[in-house]
Each structure stands twice: as C-alpha cells, then as structure tokens.
Amino acid sequence: MLKRFVVCSLTTLIPAVVVLVQSGTTHVIGAVPAVESDIGTIAGVVTKVDASAIEVRTDNNETISVTVDASTLYRKWILAKPWQQDSRANANDVEAGMRVRIDVAKNNPRIAETVWLVFGGVGYPDPSLIY
C-alpha cells in the first residue's frame, strides 16, 4: 500500500514540478527570431560594428542595431574543436560577417547584456545556424 502511495504521489508531483520550474522561461525551437521584447535575444550576422553599437542582419533579413556599453559581456559560443579554447571574448573580437546571438536587457531591448560570438558552425556565417 505504501509503495502504491509513493508511486502515485511521484507520478503526480514530478510533472507539476517540471511545469512550475519552466513556467518563467521561454523555449525556442529552431532559429532564434528577432522578436526583441518577447524572447530577449537577437541572432544573425554582424553587418556593422562600432564602439557603441552592433548592427545585426537577422535570419529574416531585418537589420537591428543594439547598443553596447562597458557592462556588456562578450562570450564565445564554441561549436567545433578545439573545445578547450578559451570561451572569453571582448568587444575587439566582434567583426562584420560574424554570426552572433545577443541577449538584450529585459527593461530595454535595445541594450545588449551578453554578446555570444559563434565559432565553428558549418556553413559559417550562412546558411543560418539552428540553435
């Protein structure tokens, strides 16, 4: 009787916990669209870079400009060997033609919080990568 109670409780409790944990997140399957306010990410190819902004051409051919500042973090998104390469990056590593994914600020979708530089994708920078 105790085993049945435990199994029934776990069968009910585990899906409820999974739904509760995922309720605050947004999941995207396929290419990340350029919907800034809903998802908080922009993905595409860098078309222009300067000290205060990055301009990105998204997969659906929209051009979006995002402001960068001293608080913007830069990281490498490593998709091919050597895996042990350093994942740190900086603003000087961003170049026109690179594939990027930019996480924007929740309170202002025109400000970049983290810029992920994509390294090692097949067909880099085109065709579009699938995340």
Image (spheres, helix red, strand yellow):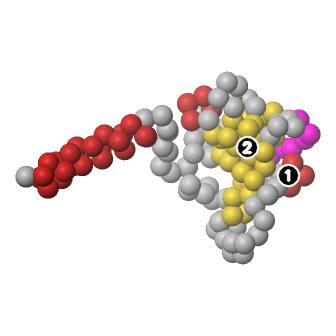
Q: Which residue is painted at 65% across and 66% down in the image?
A: 79
Q: Which mark is residue 90?
A: 1
- Dot 2 amino acid type: Thr
Dot 2 alpha-carbon crowd within 10 angstroms: few under 14, some 14 to 19, many 20 or more:
some
Q: In the displayed structure, does residue 81 sit left or right of residue 3?
A: right
Dot 1 alpha-carbon crowd within 10 angstroms: few under 14, some 14 to 19, many 20 or more:
few
Q: Is residue 106 magenta?
A: no
Residue at the disc numbered 2: 114
Q: In the displayed structure, does residue 101 sit left or right of residue 98?
A: left
Q: In the displayed structure, does residue 72 sit left or right of residue 9?
A: right
Q: Secondary structure at mark 2?
A: strand
Q: Earlier in the sequence, mark 2 or mark 1?
A: 1
Q: Which residue is painted at 35% across and 42% down in the image?
A: 17
Q: Is residue 70 above or below residue 109?
A: below
**Residue extent of the magenta highlight:** 46-52
Q: Where in the figure is residue 23, as x and y percent of width and height?
A: 42, 35
